[in-house]
């Protein structure tokens, strides 16, 4: 950290700052200017909280030179994290973006789920999404089939070979969800459920963490840090929109700038979810294309065999036909994507 002292700071006040840092193992580099004294201190911030320095007499300002997230940061790991699955699917780095698709909720109609799973696979998806534990704003809305839903996902996996991503809402359900999921999803509403993050960090399965509706990118990366610090470095980030100033035309504001920003500051893969990000069916295709060009490592898209009768999020779910048509263009873009220093370009 960099500590800027007040111009009138006394030598005693400067010494107090330096001593506190040195006692905790920080290396100090002093810069005695004509007006201001600037102290550069390198060490473990967990041993001395920046706030505890900022509150000392004579200190004007404390600036952090390192990102507050360590394990998730590019400073600590230059190479992209690539998450590999037993069937050869890879998420992250310069690998081809992956497609996760399926219904918002797993519903009792298994044939509907299977029809969606087969269709999305035929169009190029590698991962089937579907919520068995549903975080719903209202307690009167469909809450998910829970274990039964997980069993239906397992059947669809068996029949199609697709990997499964599904949400866990509670630490108590983690052992069960972990048994069925290839990727454990932590939803936007639970992005700062620190107990759940830490618990998911104790399991070996990759975790897809969705950005909270009001979370800054820094808070998002710090949430990922909790999972990593607990022992699980296989974290995938998912941008799914934040609360914006206008919900007239969109459900959330999809922050596509988050994609290159996260690639700059973190080595973790980033998926974009234009379904929750926009809430409108007609916006899924343009936002999916934009996300790929922005450098997303994949997309998560809601698809339903009969959206008008879906138990949740019908308005933002594509029909099988719409998804299939959209994927013609998406596959062309994926096929031509090239990366130049993390920025996607279309190959000539
Ligand atoms: C979901 O993907 O099923 C979901 C509930 O999304 P979010 O957590 O982003 O709202
Ligand atoms: Mn949904």
Image: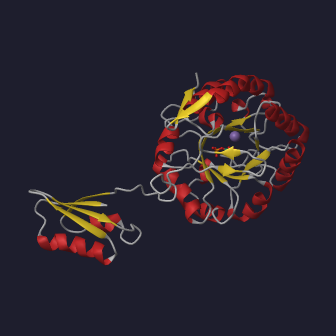
Q: Nearer the viewer, residue 253 or 335?
A: 335
Colour scheme of the rendered structure: secondary structure
Residue 243 can be seen in this image: no
Q: Is residue 23 left or right of residue 290?
A: left
Query: Which quarter of the image is occupied by the N terminus?
Result: bottom left
**Residue found at the very far bottom of the displayed protein:** 23
Q: Is residue 66 left or right of residue 231?
A: left
* Position of 34 relative to 332 (above/below): below
* Position of 223 relative to 343 (above/below): below
Q: Nearer the viewer, residue 124 or 203?
A: 124
* Position of 272 relative to 181 (above/below): above
Point out the quarter of the image occupied by ligand 2.
top right
Query: Looking at the picture, how far across and down is residue 118, in whole percent?
Result: 85, 35
Query: Looking at the picture, how far across and down is residue 114, in whole percent?
Result: 87, 38
Q: Is residue 229 left or right of residue 35?
A: right
Q: Residue at x 71, y 49 (%)?
A: 139
**Residue found at the very far front of the displayed protein:** 348
Query: Which quarter of the image is occupied by the C terminus?
Result: top right
Q: How many marks?
A: 0
Residue 196 can be seen in this image: yes
Query: Looking at the picture, how far across and down is residue 145, in whole percent?
Result: 82, 50
Q: Is residue 48 left or right of residue 70?
A: left
Q: Specify the quadrant of the image occupied by residue 203.
A: bottom right
Query: Looking at the picture, how far across and down is residue 62, in whole percent?
Result: 28, 59
């Amino acid at each position: 950290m960099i500590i800027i002292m007040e111009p009138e700071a006394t030598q005693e006040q400067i010494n107090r700052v330096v001593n506190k840092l040195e006692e905790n193992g920080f290396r100090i580099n002093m810069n005695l200017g004509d007006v201001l004294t600037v102290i550069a201190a390198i060490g473990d911030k967990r041993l001395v909280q920046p706030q505890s320095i900022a509150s000392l007499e004579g200190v004007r300002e404390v600036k952090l030179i390192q990102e507050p997230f360590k394990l998730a940061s590019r400073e600590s790991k230059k190479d992209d994290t690539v998450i590999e699955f037993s069937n050869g699917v890879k998420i992250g780095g310069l690998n081809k973006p992956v497609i996760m698709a399926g219904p918002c909720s797993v519903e009792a109609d298994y044939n509907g789920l299977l029809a969606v799973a087969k269709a999305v696979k035929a169009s190029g998806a590698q991962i089937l999404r579907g919520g068995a534990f549903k975080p719903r704003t209202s307690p009167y809305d469909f809450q998910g089939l829970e274990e039964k839903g997980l069993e239906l996902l397992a059947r669809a996996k068996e029949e199609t070979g697709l990997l499964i991503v599904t949400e866990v809402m509670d630490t108590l359900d983690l052992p069960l969800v972990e048994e069925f999921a290839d990727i454990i999803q932590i939803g936007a509403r639970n992005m700062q459920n620190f107990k759940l993050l830490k618990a998911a960090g104790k399991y070996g399965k990759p975790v897809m963490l969705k950005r909270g509706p009001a979370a800054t990118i820094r808070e998002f990366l710090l949430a990922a840090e909790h999972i990593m610090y607990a022992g699980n470095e296989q974290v995938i980030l998912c941008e799914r929109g934040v609360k914006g100033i206008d919900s007239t035309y969109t459900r959330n504001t999809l922050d596509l700038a988050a994609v290159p920003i996260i690639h700059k500051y973190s080595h973790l893969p980033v998926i974009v979810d234009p379904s929750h990000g926009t809430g409108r069916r007609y916006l899924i295709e343009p936002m999916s294309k934009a996300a790929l060009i922005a450098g997303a490592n994949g997309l998560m898209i809601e698809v339903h065999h009969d959206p008008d009768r879906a138990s949740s999020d019908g308005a933002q779910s594509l029909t099988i036909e719409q998804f299939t048509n959209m994927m013609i263009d998406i596959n062309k873009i994926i096929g031509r994507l090239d990366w130049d220093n993390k920025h996607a370009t279309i190959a000539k």
